[in-house]
């Protein structure tokens, strides 16, 4: 078939966009990947509509956009007619076409285009070629935008598998992908309910353990990051431990292992069963103990940071109802602060009133006792805090949460733990604590 000369040459605008896309992909593939938080993933602007000052300018921009899409389509057709539908020269214009669709929030179209692009990369360069990663990353964005969490998760996992195929087991280049996948699962957990949400949380925890294993092989300079990874692990174990408690409060038999969660959880991989057998209280304590040890070893760590690590360990003991161990950990913090007047004053302030134990990674700092003067959706409580940080005699003062039943609110507060006041060297109970829960 003979083609017209005009179809054998790309319009200047398309050539520029294809070159720009190619340079972006190469830069993206070669650059060191940073840790990405799913909640702060940046979205590209829709042709920066806010910058247009008139309808005429907006219409002109839309005409140019549709003309560019038409140029992409003509370019793709020309390559297909001349070289076939699997030719590697299709990768650049298909990528540019998919990104243009994505920028205009045509995520369904972008998914189809980018899936074809990824398939062409695999056909022409191999199943595990690293050039797939930028395209797969864009696919994750579009799957997330269409609430297709299952495919977004599978695509993230596929990206990690590609890197594992190209790098050795403990290669530091795996750190960013493992961290990203861990955070993505945690974000997905926040959007998910019930047993399926617990399974997603367990997936995040598995990635957390893999991140710790990678960091333990790294240079000693990574010890601070390793300490943060142990803290993140404890937060996930806190969420699992809290599930134990609320599950029991709802009248169900106590959960001694997480095996119960996998039996009826949808989409549970049978290969994941092994990770359901552990005690989150014990594992969280071990993680926080290792964090304390690491921070004591790292040069340049402030005294306040090391004290805070012991307070968090004490808080964990309190969650597990080990009152004496919690008190011992708190006292160690006071003993360490004794050499610094500012530190001891800060500790006395921290123990001046009950404070919610902040192991929940989604904890809102404004949820604190005594703050009752802000306007938004909220529930005001008054209750007593025992010497082991449990809430008793819970009463609702007033509420803007008209859709939440009082029974559920009481269950939530019964599952909430507080660091009790400390007078001298002893933990004491507090009556009449006011608390505003915001949502």
Image: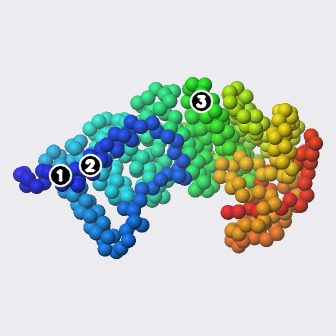
The local secondary structure at tag 3 comes to helix
In the visual, does 387 lie left or right of 361?
Answer: right
In the visual, does 232 lie left or right of 313?
Answer: left
Which residue is identified by label 3? Answer: 222
- For image coordinates 36% across by 40% down, the residue present is 27
Residue at the left extreme of this rendering: 2
Residue 337: mark in rendering: none
Question: Residue 86 or 67: which is nearer the viewer?
Answer: 67
Picture quadrant where residue 236 is located: top right
Going from N to C along the chain, the mark reached first, 3 or 1, is 1
Classify mark 1: residues with Cα within 10 Å, few (<14), some (14-19) or many (20+). Answer: some
Dots 2, 1 in contact, CB < 8 A: yes
Picture quadrant where residue 60 is located: bottom left
Q: CA distance from mark 3 to mark 1?
A: 49 Å
Question: Residue 273 or 172: which is nearer the viewer?
Answer: 172
Residue 10: mark in rendering: 1
Q: Can residue 77 be seen in this snapshot? A: no
Going from N to C along the chain, the mark reached first, 3 or 2, is 2
Classify mark 2: residues with Cα within 10 Å, few (<14), some (14-19) or many (20+). Answer: many
Q: Position of residue 299 (x, y in %)?
A: 68, 27
Question: Residue 422 or 399: which is nearer the viewer?
Answer: 422
Please state, as top left, top right, bottom left or bottom right, where the C terminus lies in the image: bottom right
Q: Position of residue 240 (x, y in %)?
A: 68, 46
In the visual, does 147 lie left or right of 25?
Answer: right
Residue 18: mark in rendering: 2
- For image coordinates 52% across by 34% down, the residue present is 175
């Amino acid at each position: 078939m003979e083609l017209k000369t005009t179809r054998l040459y790309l319009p200047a605008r398309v050539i520029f966009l294809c070159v720009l896309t190619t340079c972006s992909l190469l830069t993206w593939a070669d650059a060191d990947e940073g840790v990405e938080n799913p909640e702060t993933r940046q979205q590209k602007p829709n042709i920066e509509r806010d910058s247009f000052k008139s309808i005429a300018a907006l219409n002109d921009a839309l005409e140019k956009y549709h003309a560019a899409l038409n140029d992409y389509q003509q370019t793709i057709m020309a390559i297909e007619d001349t070289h076939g539908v699997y030719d590697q020269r299709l990768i650049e214009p298909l990528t540019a076409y998919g990104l243009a669709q994505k920028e205009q929030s045509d995520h369904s179209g972008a998914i189809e285009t980018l899936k074809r692009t990824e398939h062409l990369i695999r056909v022409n360069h191999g199943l595990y070629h690293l050039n797939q990663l930028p395209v797969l990353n864009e696919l994750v964005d579009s799957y997330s935008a269409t609430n297709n969490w299952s495919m977004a998760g599978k695509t993230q996992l596929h990206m990690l598998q590609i890197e594992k195929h190209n790098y050795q087991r403990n290669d530091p280049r795996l750190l960013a992908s493992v961290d990203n996948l861990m955070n993505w699962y945690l974000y997905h957990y926040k959007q998910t309910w019930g047993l399926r949400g617990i399974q997603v949380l367990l997936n995040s925890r598995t990635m957390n353990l893999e991140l710790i294993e990678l960091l333990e092989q790294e240079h000693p300079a990574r010890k601070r990051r390793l300490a943060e990874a142990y803290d993140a692990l404890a937060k996930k174990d806190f969420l699992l431990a809290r599930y134990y408690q609320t599950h029991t409060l709802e009248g169900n038999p106590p959960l001694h292992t997480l095996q119960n969660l996998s039996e009826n959880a949808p989409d549970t991989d049978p290969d994941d069963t092994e990770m359901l057998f552990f005690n989150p209280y014990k594992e969280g304590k071990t993680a926080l103990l290792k964090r304390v040890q690491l921070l004591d070893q790292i040069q340049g760590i402030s005294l306040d940071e090391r004290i805070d690590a012991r307070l968090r360990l004490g808080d964990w003991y309190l969650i597990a109802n080990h009152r004496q161990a919690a008190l011992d950990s708190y006292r160690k913090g006071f003993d360490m602060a004794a050499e610094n007047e500012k530190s001891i004053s800060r500790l006395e302030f921290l123990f001046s009133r009950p404070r919610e134990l902040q192991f929940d990674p989604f904890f809102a700092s404004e949820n604190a006792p005594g703050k009752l003067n802000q306007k938004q959706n909220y529930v005001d409580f008054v209750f007593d805090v025992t010497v082991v940080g449990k809430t008793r005699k819970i009463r609702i003062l007033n509420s803007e949460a008209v859709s939440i039943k009082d029974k559920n609110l009481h269950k939530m507060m019964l599952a909430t733990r507080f660091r009790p006041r400390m007078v001298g060297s002893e933990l004491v109970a507090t009556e009449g604590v006011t608390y505003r829960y915001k949502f």
